Image (cartoon, rainbow, N blue to C red):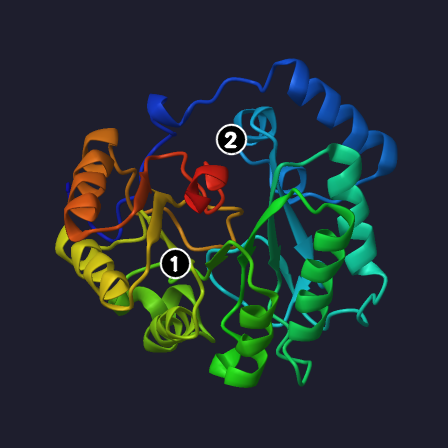
Amino acid sequence: METVLDNTLPVGKPKWLKVKLPIGQKYTELRGLVDKYSLNTICTSGSCPNMGECWGEGTATFMILGNVCTRSCGFCGVKTGRPETVDWDEPEKVARSIKIMNIKHAVITSVDRDDLKDGGSIIWIETVKAIRRMNPNTTLETLIPDFQGIERNIDRIVEANPEVVSHNVETVRRLTREVRIQAKYDRSLEVLRYLKEKGINRTKSGIMLGLGEQEEEVFQTMRDLRAANVDIVTIGQYLQPSKKHLPVKEFITPDQFAIYEKFGLELGFRHVESGPLVRSSYKAQKHIL
């Protein structure tokens, strides 16, 4: 991997980060439904570059527990502050959105809610239950926060038993304090290990690159995830949400992403999604296999 000095920032996005506008009948239909019913998907609010591809395959991502986070991670575009009160009707709303959109595989994620004693885990399990009732043929991935490592809150996710449970380490150990201020690298690994020990069939984690990490650090993070019995890893390029967020130190080449994919498969991951435009839920529907 090419090294970039801390005071040297990339100028302009490279050609491999250019994306085509989403097209296709399935995308057009779903976009119309989202607009008509004011449905809340991360795909649209986060301007995901893979939206057209995922929607075309019947996959979408929904965020619960509001849009204000109690943490202030340096990479994340979600607002930080005092969240609104919990909307106890939200599980039914999400389940209804999935039904309207005829989603085959849904990814559910949330902000961190450290202001709540249960960390939001009760809404999490109620959301999964509502989706199961209203959409019995829809498979699920839950992309969860760390719940501060509190086992009784994580146990609610285990009880819900989605097909895939994901929790992102986001970056290498050395950069965790800078990138994820209120999170801990080892706590994230423990959450992932605990989920597997409790019987979750597929566990998954994601890493962003371009924040100043070195190749060997990425390799070590992948080793750490496999040691926690993680089945699936996603690796993508970090892009700065605004000038207030951490700068991009380096644009990682497609060839380097291919090296990480090969390394991950050799380590024994069931699936490795590694590429500049890869996001946590990219090709999520195949990860249940």
> Quick one: label 2, few (<14), some, or many (20+) residues within 10 Å?
many
* Residue 10, horizontal then vertical, whole percent: 31, 37
275 up-or-down from 66: above or below? above
225 up-or-down from 113: above or below? above
Q: Nearer the viewer, residue 54 or 113?
A: 54
Residue drawn at x 66%, y 53% is 63
Residue drawn at x 43%, y 23% is 18
Residue drawn at x 67%, y 67% is 125
Query: Is the C-beta separation of discs 2 and 1 under 8 Å?
Result: no
Which comes before the other along the chain, label 2 or label 1? Answer: 2
Amino acid type at circle 2 is Asn
Amino acid type at circle 1 is Glu
132 up-or-down from 237: above or below? below
Count of numbered badges drawn on the protein: 2
| Mark 2: secondary structure | loop
The disc label shown at residue 50, or none: 2
* Residue 238, horizontal then vertical, whole percent: 39, 45
The residue where tag 1 is placed is 170
> Quick one: label 1, few (<14), some, or many (20+) residues within 10 Å?
many
Q: Quadrant of residue 200?
A: bottom left
From the viewer's perspective, is 160 left or right of 32? Answer: left
* Residue 263, horizontal then vertical, whole percent: 16, 45
Q: Nearer the viewer, residue 244 or 265?
A: 265
126 up-or-down from 55: above or below? below
Q: Nearer the viewer, residue 218 or 147?
A: 147
Q: CA distance from mark 2 to mark 1?
A: 19 Å
Residue drawn at x 57%, y 18% is 21
Whether residue 94 is visible, yes or no, is: yes
* Residue 164, horizontal then vertical, whole percent: 48, 54
Residue at far front of view: 136
Q: Quadrant of residue 43?
A: top right
| Mark 1: secondary structure | loop
